[in-house]
Image (cartoon, rainbow, N blue to C red):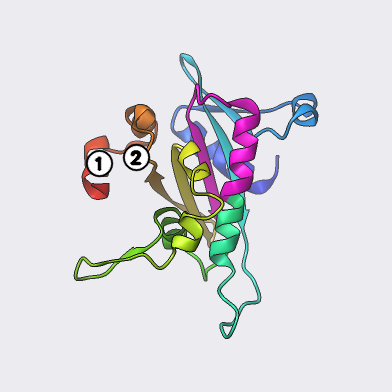
Amino acid sequence: MIRDEKLVADLLESKGLRAEEFSKEEKKRSKAPDFRVFDEHGLAFFCEVKSLFGSNWFGGARPDPTYNRVSQKIYEAVKQFNAVNPHLDYPNVLVFVNHYKGSDVKDLRFVCEGGVKTDSGRWLPIYRKFSEGRIRDKKRRIHLYIWIDVFNGEPNDFRLHNLDSPEYLDRLCDYFGSDPASIRASRG
């Protein structure tokens, strides 16, 4: 198990969950996500871990590659989830482990939601290229996004729930200590 996967497995264990890696044979047959995650009743959800590292981008004529990188990771994760959970019988959870101080959870929000809300409340759809591009429908196959910034060895987690699939919201909120009503209100 690599370092970021271990970090996530430990996080899941701290929530009373058990992460089990797919066997080598299963991974040979299809591109599976990193973990099956179990609670006391059995299989709870599938989990994929994606690591994000910085780039040599310094601004200028070409666009920031961060949004493409996040979009690509979502695209890859959905293919992995589809290999084991094509009918969405269980929730899919994607965990981003970010090692790049030039990126934060807002980048994930921009890619998934397609824009930003200004201080005045106006919606600016400036990231639709990503949200409505190749991940337009795929991003909805992930029920929970978790973003962990890893700086100085201390993880800081953030949850971005996919309200397009509310059937799993209460259960996932219970696992991760979130209030479903506050999530619905904040996203409404």
> Which of the 4 image quadrants contains residue 171?
top left
Proximity of marks 1 and 2: CB atoms separated by less than 8 Å: yes
Q: Which residue is drawn at 44% across and 40% down?
A: 144
Residue 99 seen from this side? no
Residue 123 seen from this side? yes
> Which of the 4 image quadrants contains residue 177?
top left
Q: Which residue is drawn at 51% across and 33% down?
A: 92
Residue 1 percent coordinates (x, y): 70, 39
Q: Mark 2 points at which residue?
A: 163
> Which of the 4 image quadrants contains residue 172?
top left
N-term mark: 1 or 2? 2
Q: In this view, does 29 lie to the left or right of 154?
A: right
Q: Which residue is drawn at 60% across and 47% down?
A: 75
Residue 79 on the magenta segment: yes
Dot 1 crowding, Cα within 10 Å, few <14, some 14–19, many 20+: few
Q: How far apart are marks 1 and 2 (CA)?
A: 8 Å
Q: Mark 1 points at which residue?
A: 184
| Residue stretch rendered in magenta on the structure | 74-99
Instruction: Tell me if residue 95 comes above or below residue 156 in the rendering.
Output: above
Dot 2 crowding, Cα within 10 Å, few <14, some 14–19, many 20+: some
Using the image, tell me which numbered label, if any, was put on residue 127.
none
**Which amino acid, mark 2?**
Leu
